[in-house]
Amino acid sequence: MRRYGKHTDEDDIRTRPNRKGNRPRTNIRPKHEDAAEGMVLTVDRGRLTCLVEGRTVLAMKARELGRKAAVVGDRVALVGDLSGRKDTLARIVRIEARTSVLRRTADDDDPYERVVVANADQLAIVTALADPEPRPRLIDRCLVAAYDGGLDPLLVLTKSDLAPPGKLLDLYGDLDIPHVVTSRLELEEGAAADRVREHLADKVTAFVGHSGVGKTTLVNALVPEDRRRMTGHVNAVTGRGRHTTTSALALPLGDADGWVVDTPGVRSFGLAHIDPSRVIHAFPDLEPGTEGCPRACSHDEPDCALDEWVTEGHADPARLYSLRRLLATRERRDGD
């Protein structure tokens, strides 16, 4: 082993050469204080279309953001070429804090949650009353995801000319969810879109529903100047529709000063990421009764304090039943 004396020369010190010839890394990152504000409209294979000062700009995520991904609805900060001209590309350098998040997993055993939309005010759950048949368990799951993510739910029932809405509405009457019932004729004539539009003004609304229920057709009627792809058909054998929307897309509502976010049709809505303790916040009449619950109470067990709270007359028993039905839907399959 080579030993150095008291008077070593720097030339004697071995250093590892930097074969790449680049500068050494630093933890200091630019603050981008002059970055422009924008909103993500859609994401396609790593390229994000953003609205910046009234024009659409194509951008990519900056490397410094790491694995953090931007989704439709995100408020972001951008630098680079913001002209929006063809063959130009900006960089997203910051993703602002989100006010709400609509998330789902592929199924209840999937630990990986997917953020569908950020910063939406409302979740419009679109379901057909027939052709295909309504799936209450899927509606329940969407409601749980809305309550958990901080979105207000809205029920949009289509094809009322094929089946009456009364039975399905009775199932959700105790939840006080606003609803709109439409028919195919009303949709064609524009009356249905007008009624739905009344619930969308000044809000960012994400539309969700399984294929074939008329979700994209409704969005086309709401935003006719920016129509989506050709709508699909319902398979006569399986009762399932063909996907016509392949990626989430935010569209301006026009004179109503709001945004519509059309999302891909879903066949399942996993809730593996849901914390039951957050769902109770959507039931303000029941929430005070949880103060006496045991730690980590599921609100559907023998020691749950909500039973006594309701028995004492502080809340309607139907509300407690609705809460427990929504929480229990995490343990059921969508098609049940």
Image (spheres, rainbow, N blue to C red):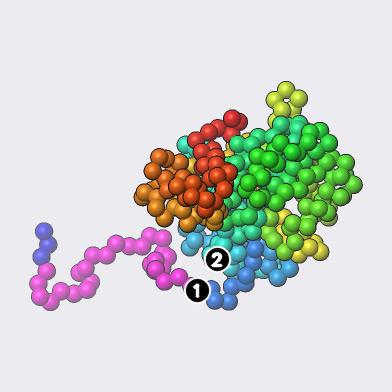
Closest to the observer, 300 or 316:
316
Q: Is residue 220 above or below residue 134?
A: below
Q: Which mark is residue 31?
A: 1
**Above or below: residue 326 compared with residue 75:** above
Q: Which structural element holds mark 1?
A: loop
| Mark 1: few/some/many CA within 10 Å (<14, 14-19, 20+) | few
Q: Quadrant of residue 38?
A: bottom right
User: x%, y% of residue 293?
Assistant: 40, 50
- Quadrant where the image shows the C terminus: top right
Q: Viewer-proximal residue, 87 or 83?
A: 83
Q: Is residue 8 magenta?
A: yes
Q: Label 2: which residue?
A: 96
Q: Quadrant of residue 152?
A: bottom right
Q: CA distance from mark 2 to mark 1?
A: 13 Å
Q: Which residues are magenta?
A: 4-31
Looking at the rendering, in which quadrant would you find the N terminus? bottom left
Circle 2 crowding by C-alpha within 10 Å: few under 14, some 14–19, many from 20:
few
| x and y percentages locating residue 218 in the rendered image | 78, 47
Majority SS type along the magenta span: loop
Amino acid tagged 1: Lys
The mark lying in front, picked from 2 and 1, is: 2
**Residue 332 falls inside the magenta stretch:** no
Mark 2 vs 1, N-terminal side: 1
Q: Secondary structure beneath disc 2?
A: loop
Identify which residue is drawn at 60% across, 44% down: 142
91 with respect to 265 (left or right): left
Residue at horizontal 84%, vertical 40%? 184
The kind of residue on which mark 2 rests is: Glu
